[in-house]
Image (cartoon, grey):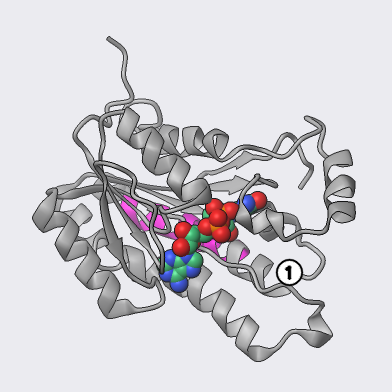
Amino acid sequence: MTSLGLEDKVVLVTGGNRGIGAAIVSLLQELGTQVAYTYRSSSEDQHGALAIQADVTDKAAMEAVAEKVEQKLGPIYGIVANAGITRDNFFPKLAIEDWDAVIDTNLKGVYNTLMPVIPKMYEREEGSVVCISSISGERGNLGQTNYAASKAAVIGLTKSLAREAARYGVRVNAVSPGFIETDMVKSVPDKVKERIVSEIPLRRFGKPEEVAWAIAFLLSPIASSYVTGEVLRVNGAHHT
Ligand SMILES: NC(=O)c1ccc[n+]([C@@H]2O[C@H](COP(=O)([O-])OP(=O)(O)OC[C@H]3O[C@@H](n4cnc5c(N)ncnc54)[C@H](O)[C@@H]3O)[C@@H](O)[C@H]2O)c1
C-alpha cells in the first residue's frame, strides 16, 4: 500500500488546539502519526494526541515540551511551527506592545520551538520541520507591518536553516497559506473579506484541511524527500 511514511513517526505541532493546527493534528492522526501538540490556554481534546499547555514565547516551557514528548512518545521526527497571532493596526497607531507580542510569538516562538529539538535531529540524521509563514509575509498587507515582518522572517529562517541542516539529513520547509477560514480570519470585516475573495482566482478562502495536506506532504520522508528550503503556497492562486 502507498503511504506518506508518517506511520508511528512522532510529530510536534504548536498551537494544535484550533484552526490550521487542529486540522494538521487530525490529519496526522489519520495517517497513523504519533502526535503531540501544544496549546496556550484552552484545549479541545484531540483524542489520542498528547496535549501540552505551553506558551511558545517561553523558552524554558518549550524545552520542557520537547523533553516530555520524547519521554512519552519517543524521538521527535517532525515539527510543525504553527502557533501564531495577529495584532493588526496601521503603522502610526501600532503600539510597541503589539509589535513585540507578534514578533515574540511568530518569530521567537519558532526559535523556542526548534532549538531544543534540532540538535537531536542532527544526531539522529533524520527530521522534517515545517514552519508556517503567510501570504502577508510574502507580499505585505494593510495593517500588518508587524505580522508581515514576522512571517517574512520565518521564510528567511526556514531557508537558512534548510541550508545548515541538509548535511545532517534534516529538511526544513515553510507553508505559506493565503486566507484560510479560521478564527484568525473571522475578525476581518465582511466588506474587506468580499474584496479579498474577489482577488482570489479560486474565488473562496481556503480550508484548514487544505493547508494540513501541504504540511503532511512536506513532513513526509517519502513524498518530499528531495524538497528542502522551499516555501509552498496554499493560496488559491492569490497573487503574491
Ligand atoms: N488563517 C489564515 O488565514 C492564515 C493565513 C496565513 C497564515 N496563517 C498562520 O497559520 C497559523 C495558524 O493560524 P490559524 O488561522 O489556525 O490561527 P488560530 O488563531 O485559529 O490559531 C492559532 C493557534 O496558535 C496558538 N497560539 C497563539 N499564541 C500562542 C502562544 N504564545 N503560545 C502557544 N500557542 C499559541 C493558539 O493557541 C492557536 O492554537 C499561524 O501561524 C498563522 O499566522 C493563518
Q: Can you tell which quarter of the image residue 71 is in?
A: bottom left
- Numbered range of the magenta stretch: 152-165
Q: Can you tell which quarter of the image residue 128 is in?
A: top left
Magenta-span inclusion, residue 86: no
Where does residue 122 sit, x and y in percent of width and height?
Answer: 21, 55
Residue drawn at x 31%, y 13% as measured from the top left? 2
Secondary structure of the residue carrying tag 1 is loop
Where does residue 94 sit, x and y in percent of width and height?
Answer: 74, 84
Residue under pointer 1? 144
Most prominent secondary structure in the magenta stretch? helix
Q: Residues within 10 Å of mark 1 (few under 14, many from 20)?
A: many
Q: Can residue 83 be seen by looking at this rendering?
A: no
Magenta-span inclusion, residue 161: yes
The kind of residue on which mark 1 rests is Gln
Residue 224 lies, with reference to residue 40, above or below; the image says above
Whether residue 203 sits left or right of residue 58 in the image: it is: right
